[in-house]
Image (cartoon, helix red, strand yellow):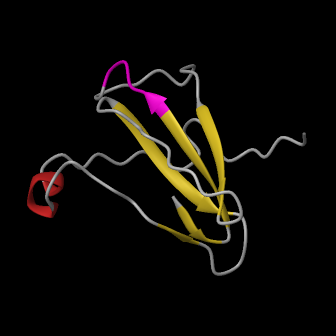
Amino acid sequence: MAVQGTCIVGAVKIDDWENPSKDLPVSRFVLSELKPSIVYIPGGYASGFMSLTAGGKVLIFSNRTLEESRVDHVRFDAHYWDAWQVTER
């Protein structure tokens, strides 16, 4: 949920955590404080966000504690699937 500014959220359902395909479809969501909404991303997805405005803030909810999330922490290069392309409407 964007609580300040606007951001883009990207999510990819991972097929293989050790060697994920680069051809997986990317879901993109643009969130804005001007139109409050929440994106639900289920388990099995890699996700990330990028602010589109200066000073943007995002509120993240989780069904895990911080301790639980530390052992389930996988990182990919930010441009592995290039979720950050902005498409004009």
Q: Residue 22 is drawn in which quadrant?
A: top right
Task: Say if residue 83 shows up in the picture.
Answer: no
Task: Report the span colored magenta.
Answer: 12-16
Instruction: Choose between 48 and 5: the one closer to the eye.
Output: 5
Residue 51: where, in percent of width, then height? Answer: 64, 65
Residue 14 belongs to the span the image colors magenta:
yes
Residue 63: where, in percent of width, then height? Answer: 21, 48
Q: Residue 41 is drawn in which quadrant?
A: top left
Instruction: Choose between 78 and 47: the one closer to the eye.
Output: 47
Residue 61: where, in percent of width, then height? Answer: 33, 56
- Rendered residue at 16%/57% (across/down): 70
Q: How many marks?
A: 0
Horizontal relation, residue 72 to residue 60: left or right: left
In the displayed image of the protein, which residue is found farthest to the right?
Answer: 89
Q: Quadrant of the C terminus?
A: top right
Horizontal relation, residue 39 to residue 73: left or right: right
Task: Say if residue 84 shows up in the picture.
Answer: yes
Q: Residue 88 is drawn in which quadrant?
A: top right
- Rendered residue at 58%/22% (across/down): 25
Question: Taking 23 as reference, is 66 above or below it?
Answer: below
Question: Taking 87 as reference, is 15 above or below it?
Answer: above
Question: Taking 78 as reference, is 4 above or below it?
Answer: below
Residue 38: where, in percent of width, then height? Answer: 50, 49
Question: Taking 38 as reference, is 20 above or below it?
Answer: above
Instruction: Choose between 77 and 29: the one closer to the eye.
Output: 29
Residue 2 belongs to the span the image colors magenta:
no
Horizontal relation, residue 36 to residue 68: left or right: right
- Rendered residue at 29%/32% (across/down): 43
Q: Main secondary structure of the magenta part?
A: loop
